[in-house]
Amino acid sequence: MMAGLREVTEYHLQGDGMTLVFHRGDDEEMRLEYNDKVFSGRALYRETTVLGLVVSAIVETIPDLHTVFLTVIIPEAHCPPDARSVPVSTFAVFTTKRTSIAGPDLVSGQIDVYKLVSPLTGNAWQRKSVMSARNSKYSGLIYVKHGGVGSKSEGPVYYLQTGKGDLILRYQDRHPWEPDYKLEFFVRRMVEIEGKLAHEVPEGTAVLNVEHVRPTLATSVADHPVL
């Protein structure tokens, strides 16, 4: 690599009404955000091919009907020393795998149906990981908003409001449209959360992988220690 060039690690992409954020890293850090939903770990499939890094996630499942996968091609890119980011362009594919109550063998016609989203355009840059090596404690108010509004994956996104900004909460593996019943119990309550901070995005939002959550007696976010 030419001296001064930096390999980009974070991509922000838009196209056909959807927003994608992808963060490169090791198995714990690699994440795909699709319309405010976060996929990582076992929920994120990845493979390096001649096209680039290929990442996929299940964004919709309807039993006995179909499963929808989102696949995004992540191009390798380098950022010059005199720039904060570089423009990138790529594409994504929605794959609908049709099935039936007896599996795909009873499906008539094409089983795999594709929808191409092209181009996906945006910017990419190098961002240092802020994954903590150990669990830390974060305090504030849990609230919920709907993400992916108007899409098939519309569903709840859980946040922790703190004195220095909000954190997206990720507790248990779930489909984007499903509620997290463990976090639902604490919505609109002051809590203390033990977990690992995963990564930041430019707007200042970060993802907090929750290990433990418990209620507190605080009556205001200002009563809590800040980040």
Image (cartoon, grey):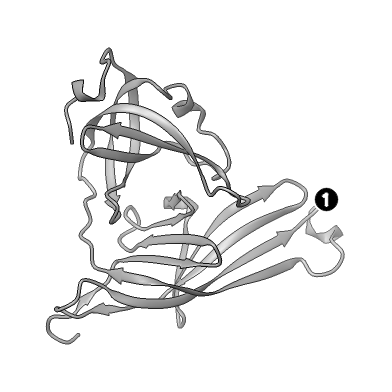
At 28% from the left edge and 56% from the top edge, which residue is drawn? 202
The image quadrant where one finds the N terminus is bottom left
Amino acid at the residue labelled 1? Ala
- Residue position for label 1: 102
- Percent across and percent down for residue 157 are 46, 40
Asked which quadrant contains residue 189, the reply is top left
Name the spot of residue 177 as percent of width and height, x first: 58, 42
Q: Is residue 23 left or right of residue 187?
A: left
Q: How many marks?
A: 1
Place of residue 76 in the rendered image (x, y in percent of width and height, measured from the top left)? 34, 77
The quadrant holding residue 129 is bottom left
* Residue situated in front as seen by the camera: 87 or 173: 87
Find residue 3 and report its horizontal and vertical position in percent. 12, 84
Residue at 19% in and 20% down: 223
Quarter of the figure that contains the C terminus: top left
Q: Which residue occupies 30% across, 61% down?
A: 25
Identify the residue shown where x is 57% and y is 38%. 178
Relative vertical location of residue 155 with respect to residue 186 in this rendering, above or below: below
Secondary structure type for disc 1: loop
Q: Residues within 10 Å of mark 1 (few under 14, many from 20)?
A: few
Q: Is residue 90 left or right of residue 155?
A: left
* Residue furthest bottom in the image: 2
Rendered position, 192 above or below 60: above
Horizontal arrangement in the rendering, residue 5 relative to residue 168 (left or right): left
The residue lying furthest to the top in this view is 217
Query: Which residue appears farthest toward the left when viewing the image?
Result: 3
In the displayed structure, 216 sits above or below 166; it is above
In terms of image quadrants, where is residue 9? bottom left
